[in-house]
Image (tube, rainbow, N blue to C red):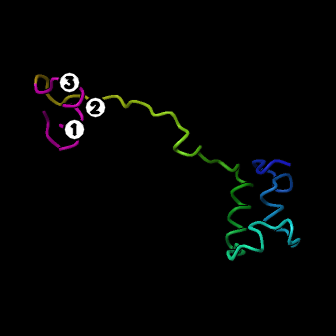
Amino acid sequence: MKAIVPGKLDESDLHVRIRSTDKDEVMPPSKEHYQLTERQKTILDKWIEQGAEYQQHWAYIRPARPAPPDAAEQGFTRNAIDLFVSHGSGNSG
């Protein structure tokens, strides 16, 4: 069984395990001192039903170089860093 099958509760191990009453199957394990509330379980179930969209952890996403903003006025910048600085400070050049 997969951990999450978007849109399919009964095929999602996450749903099965958070709803289990079996002490060897329930998540989080009963030896942990933290248990999910009914509200938290319902939120997770709704998330699965609605497609379970999520982003990969930021540490595994390849950084992308942003495009520099357009210069408000030409002639006041010498490189891309100048464009970011002038754009961020509210100055026009």
- Above or below residue 45? Residue 56 is above
Q: CA distance from mark 1 to mark 3?
A: 13 Å
Question: Mark 2 near mark 1, Cβ–Cβ under 8 Å?
Answer: yes
View extreme (left): residue: 75
View extreme (right): residue: 22
Give percent across and percent down for residue 84. 24, 35
Q: Which one is earlier in the sequence, the residue at label 1 or at label 3?
A: 3
Q: Quadrant of residue 18?
A: bottom right
On the image, numbered disc 3 is attached to which residue? 79
On the image, numbered disc 1 is attached to which residue? 87
Q: CA distance from mark 2 to mark 3?
A: 11 Å
Give percent across and percent down for residue 16. 84, 61
Q: CA distance from mark 2 to mark 1?
A: 7 Å
What residue is at 39 percent from the left and 30 percent from the top? 65
Q: Which one is earlier in the sequence, the residue at label 2 or at label 1?
A: 2
What residue is at 15 percent from the left and 23 percent from the top? 78
- Above or below residue 70? Residue 44 is below
Question: Mark 1 near mark 3, Cβ–Cβ under 8 Å?
Answer: no
Give amino acid for label 3: Asn
On the image, numbered disc 2 is attached to which residue? 69
What residue is at 70 percent from the left and 49 percent from the top? 51
Q: Which one is earlier in the sequence, the residue at label 2 or at label 3?
A: 2
Q: Quadrant of residue 49?
A: bottom right
Residue span colored magenta: 76-93
- Mark 1, Cα crowd under 10 Å, few <14 / some 14-19 / many 20+, is some
Give amino acid for label 1: His
Question: Mark 2 near mark 3, Cβ–Cβ under 8 Å?
Answer: no
Give percent across and percent down for residue 67. 34, 28
